[in-house]
Amino acid sequence: MVLLGLLVIGVGVALSLTVLFKVDTFRIENMDGSTPADTGIYTEDAILGALGVPVGENMFQFSAAQKEKNMVVSLPYLERVEIRRRLPSTLVIRVEPAVETWCAQSDSGWLTLSDGLKIMKISEEQPQGLPALLGLDIEAPVAGYYLKLATPNATATPAPAASGVSAVQSTASSSSSSTSGSEQSAHDPMDDVNRLLELLWTYELKDDCTSIQFGDSNELYFIYQNRAKVLLGTFNNLDYKIKFAAYLLHNEDGKGIGDTEQGTLDVSHQLEDGSLRPTWSPGSITASDSGESDTAQTSTAGENDTGQTGDENQTDGETGDAANADEGDGQADSTEGGDTAAQTEEDGQTATPEPTAEPAA
């Protein structure tokens, strides 16, 4: 009986790999299974060509996972590809088109990036209308692969088959290196990039973001609506910093920054209790269309927590001032009126009070 059972199983496997389950129908769907599928810039014939499975091939003689990886590389304008077998003879290809969302400057040229930071194309000219990621040490960019930053002993890896707009920030992985004979986990700089982009989405700043400067990890900043330079300092406590900046920039309760005001917002200065002391320095900033670092002059809080700032952006030969607001760590939905006193500089000019309300929890 055992021999008979093994024989039956063997015959079944042989038939399934030779006679049965041959592909005779292809179906291209959206990720939710709906049709007609949004295939972006590609035709269905182009997608089937990249699939590389001819009619009549057995459905189990190839790896669906490997096909998915190959297709997202060979079709850079697809963010995700999933292949499913629908017995007895239908092969289903589910696709999600990539959307041009960011751009980044590299030694190879300007990269057009999807929301998942997939490299869609490389060109000499900066893509128009896309916020720029500047100052990144990008490693060997290749269209169809995900953005990767230079790290010790790191090599480019193909874009994973399953990634997406909402999952852009979870696509990063940590690398490891050996130090003093022991394996230690090396910090992947993509973790910081993904975390920052995720927070810009979360606090609804991405759509108005013009550029982000990553060059110096201690002087991180982004440009908002080409009119406000937002200084973040380091990646420490980034969630709180961006939440606070969003509260002031959105100005929903009228206690933040006006819709037409220009200047530098510094949310990088933290007190010992963890609270922020933001400063707003009115004045014009320079946002370069070429993607070079923005050159706005900025002010920073003093080392002794005095909160005094000086705006070096001179317009009519005069120097503008900024006031500081000391934000309490446990206070919400309230203002600290005592911290809005106008500051003066050596020339006796009165500084512009800054918004002092803390964002709601």
Image: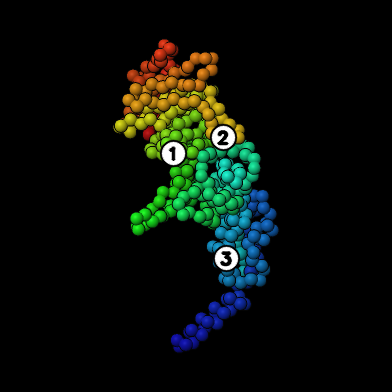
Q: Nearer the viewer, mark 2 or mark 3?
A: 2
**Nearer the N terminus, badge 2 or badge 3?**
3
The kind of secondary structure element at disc 2 is: loop
Local crowd size for mark 2, using a 10 Å CA cut-off: few (<14), some (14–19), many (≥20): some
Q: CA distance from mark 2 to mark 1?
A: 17 Å
Q: Is residue 38 visible?
A: no
Question: Where's residue 235, x and y in %?
Answer: 41, 39
Residue tagged 3? 85
In the rendered image, which quarter is residue 90 located in?
bottom right
In the rendered image, which quarter is residue 128 located in?
top right
Q: CA distance from mark 2 to mark 3?
A: 48 Å
Residue tagged 2? 292
Local crowd size for mark 1, using a 10 Å CA cut-off: few (<14), some (14–19), many (≥20): some
Question: Where's residue 361, x and y in %?
Answer: 37, 34
Tell me the kind of residue under disc 2: Glu
Residue at horizontal 43 percent and vertical 28 percent from the top:
266
- In the rendered structure, the answer to whether residue 184 lies left or right of residue 71 reads left
Residue at horizontal 32 percent and vertical 25 percent from the top:
304
**Nearer the N terminus, badge 2 or badge 1?**
1
**Nearer the N terminus, badge 3 or badge 1?**
3
Q: Nearer the viewer, mark 3 or mark 1?
A: 1
Tell me the kind of residue under disc 1: Ser
Q: Residue 263 versus residue 27: which sits nearer the camera?
A: 263
Residue tagged 1? 217
Residue at horizontal 54 percent and vertical 78 percent from the top:
13
